[in-house]
Amino acid sequence: MLCLYKVTIIDTIGESHAINFKRFEYPNLMELIIDNTYDDIGDCKGRAMCKTCFVEPIENEIEKDINNISFINTPETMDYLFACQIIVDKNINNHTFRILDRD
């Protein structure tokens, strides 16, 4: 049985994108964002060095505990996160992330 999940991405101009995905369909959230929005992020290709893929987790009614999100490397803060470090699995299902403008 194929299990689809959903994540909502708010892009840098404020548009909301509800994106369906399969578990591990993308190596990380950054790749999902690049493939499904017009935002140009991830200058370092996912090595967490360029700081161009910052996202802010937005609380929602379905799940308020973002501490269950799976990371490639544990972040120092949960106020903003590198999208390239967030694993695309069931733990981000129904979460909302806002892409932070790098200007």
Image (cartoon, grey):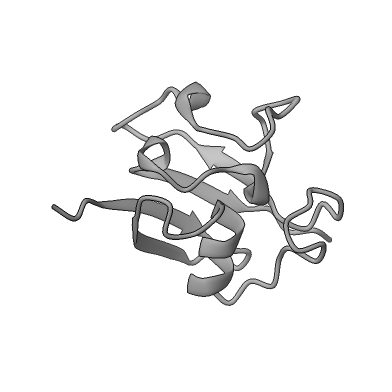
Total number of numbered discs in the rendering? 0
Residue sitting at the far bottom: 38
Look at 63% across and 38% down and name the residue there: 72
Residue 101 visible? The answer is yes
In terms of image quadrants, where is residue 11? bottom right
Quadrant where the image shows the C terminus: bottom right
- On the image, the x and y values in percent for residue 31 come to 58, 63
**Residue placed at 86% from the left, 50% from the top?**
49
Instruction: Give how far across and how far down residue 20 sits, in percent.
Output: 32, 61
Q: Residue at x 69, y 33 (%)?
A: 73
Left or right position of 5 against 77: left
Q: Nearer the viewer, residue 23 or 97?
A: 23
In screen coordinates, is 65 left or right of 100?
left
Q: Give the vertical position of 62 relative to 85 (above or below).
A: above
In the drawing, does residue 67 fall left or right of residue 45? left
Left or right, residue 29 beside residue 55: left
Q: Residue drawn at (47%, 48%), measured in percent from left and top?
A: 88
Q: Relative to 103, is 5 above or below?
A: above
- Looking at this view, name the residue that lies furthest to the left: 1
- State whether residue 14 appears in this view: no
Q: Position of residue 8 (x, y in %)?
A: 41, 54
